[in-house]
Image (spheres, coloured by chain):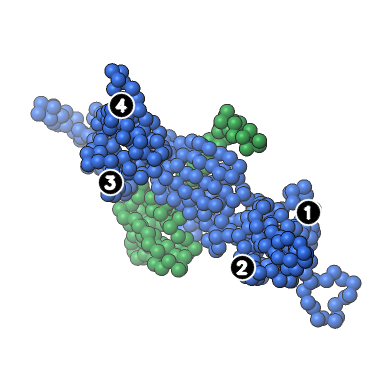
Chain colours: A green, B blue
Amino acid sequence: MEHGAFGDQSNATFSLTEEDHTLANAVRFTLNQDPRVTFCGYSIPHPSDARVNIRVQTTGDPAREVLKDACQDLMLMCQHVRSTFDKAVTDFKTSERGQAMNIDSEE
Amino acid sequence: MAEKTDKKQVNEGKGKFSSLDLPDLPKRLPPQLEFQRTRVLCNLDAPIHTDNVMYGGAYASMGVDNSVQLDCFRQKFRVEVVRLTKDDMEFDLIGIDPSIANAFRRILIAELPTMAIEKVLIANNTSVIQDEVLAHRLGLIPIMVDPRLFEYISENDTNNEKNTIVYKLHVRCQRGAPRLTVKTNELKWLPNGSELLLDSKNSDSNPTSKPRTYTSFSCSQASLPKFANNPINPMPEITIARLGPGQEIELEAHAVKGMGKTHAKWSPVATAWYRMLPEVVLLEDVEDEDAEKLVNTCPVKVFDIEDIGNGKKKATVARPRACTLCRECLRIGEEWEKRVSLRRIKDHFIFTIESTGALPPEVLFTEAVKILEDKCERVITELS
């Protein structure tokens, strides 16, 4: 849910439930890279509640849109990581070293 | 000074034109700032330059763009697999930020689901191991099955073949026999579900109908194609208990799907960790006796001796990747801090994943990345 002023869409705090440092730190990183963002950060009000507050302040664009774009960028980065990793693993398995390891483990 | 007046004339001639627009040299940071941005310097007392300069406009006054645009990331990011076996793997992620690498590590440990024994129905336990200790040990046994084939069970669901795996353990040590070690090989898989009957004092129930048990399997799990020839076994050769003569254990265990967040027994990795790539640099030439001292001090043999003619020897850095940051090379004497520089490269991570056996480690990493994508997806749909 978003806590912000009605008139000013550019500054808001987003409270996400069932989340922790895993997602919040990664989203904060991608938010920082966005040139429209003047301030971003996250806090965990209490470690026993699974709740994260992400604060976004922008240079005019609605904070909601900027956060959505940051999440979108993070998703694209993850997809790229996954495809590069899969390719590296298949290359390794088909290369000589992969075959050597297979033979060792089967013996 | 002559350059400045030239530019000024150009300015006046062409209207709005800034000298920054001239394509002279590509904008690079001066070397000392580049060093601070990309390396952690590990001094004898503590590391410095450890924080990441994340703000996109950090070096704007120098005209250098610090942001990580997606295309830049795609060009620079690489993965190199160093070791890949059935149970563990070591690979390098190059060009990624620590917040994302840490997110992967946290997901690998806590948010990838597995199957583990949750409910233990004990019919008879005359061993010296108490019921609860025995149940705790059974919960920690890894179960070698792909957890993606099963569904989560919630409080109101009944245990059926899609969300539960049932095991039976019945061992007895005969009188006069030597002590018996009960291993996980004794856990028998029951593909048809539970065999323990629920008490029902209901006299209306049809005596010919199937008696109700603790699970309601509509079909046998062995009939499903994926389990037809692969029985679902726990990891073999793990000791559960030891029985003396005359002692007996008879119990039934139900395994369900869960995540490491709830209890560590559901974590699919023995552990998963990463470290930054070490970089060891000799700032001055280290020769002869000093070289010998240096090579002998390092416990992991990072340094090597090289002969450079005239009988002189020089020390070189042969295996920087093995450096464990013990700083023994800096403690040899007072001036050694100026000769050897220990550094870490901030965006090169050496990941190691050790799987407990349910899924191979490369599949675990791919699933972890998928889970991070799902989390982002969930946030986007909540916001829309």
Q: Position of residue B356 (x, y in %)?
A: 59, 51
The answer for how far apart the CA atoms under marks 3 and 2 are is 46 Å
Residue with the most extreme left position: B1
**Label 4: few (<14), some (14–19) or many (≥20) C-alpha neighbours in 10 Å:** some
Badge 1 and badge 2 both on one subunit: yes
Under mark 2, the amino acid is Val
User: Earlier along the polypeptide chain: callout 3 or callout 4?
Assistant: 3
User: Earlier along the polypeptide chain: callout 2 or callout 4?
Assistant: 2
The answer for how far apart the CA atoms under marks 1 and 3 are is 61 Å
The answer for how far apart the CA atoms under marks 1 and 2 are is 31 Å
Q: Nearer the viewer, mark 1 or mark 4?
A: 4
Q: Chain of mark 2?
A: B
The answer for how far apart the CA atoms under marks 3 and 4 are is 23 Å
- Which quadrant of the structure image shows residue B326? top left
- Comparing B223 with B82, the one in front is B82
In the rendered image of this protein, does residue A77 appear above or below residue A20? above
- Which quadrant of the structure image shows residue B247? bottom right
Residue matched to label 2: B133
Residue matched to label 4: B314
Q: Are marks 1 and 3 in contact (CB under 8 Å)?
A: no
Q: Position of residue B307 (x, y in %)?
A: 33, 22
| Residue drawn at the location 32% of the way across and 44% of the way down | B327
**SS at mark 2 in the image:** helix
Q: Which mark is residue B222?
A: 1
User: Earlier along the polypeptide chain: callout 1 or callout 3?
Assistant: 3
Q: Chain of mark 4?
A: B
- Residue B287 placement, left or right of B170: left
In the rendered image of this protein, does residue B347 appear above or below residue B109? above
| Residue drawn at the location 29% of the way across and 49% of the way down | B46
User: Earlier along the polypeptide chain: callout 1 or callout 4?
Assistant: 1
Badge 3 and badge 2 both on one subunit: yes
Is residue B96 at all visible to an observer of this figure? no
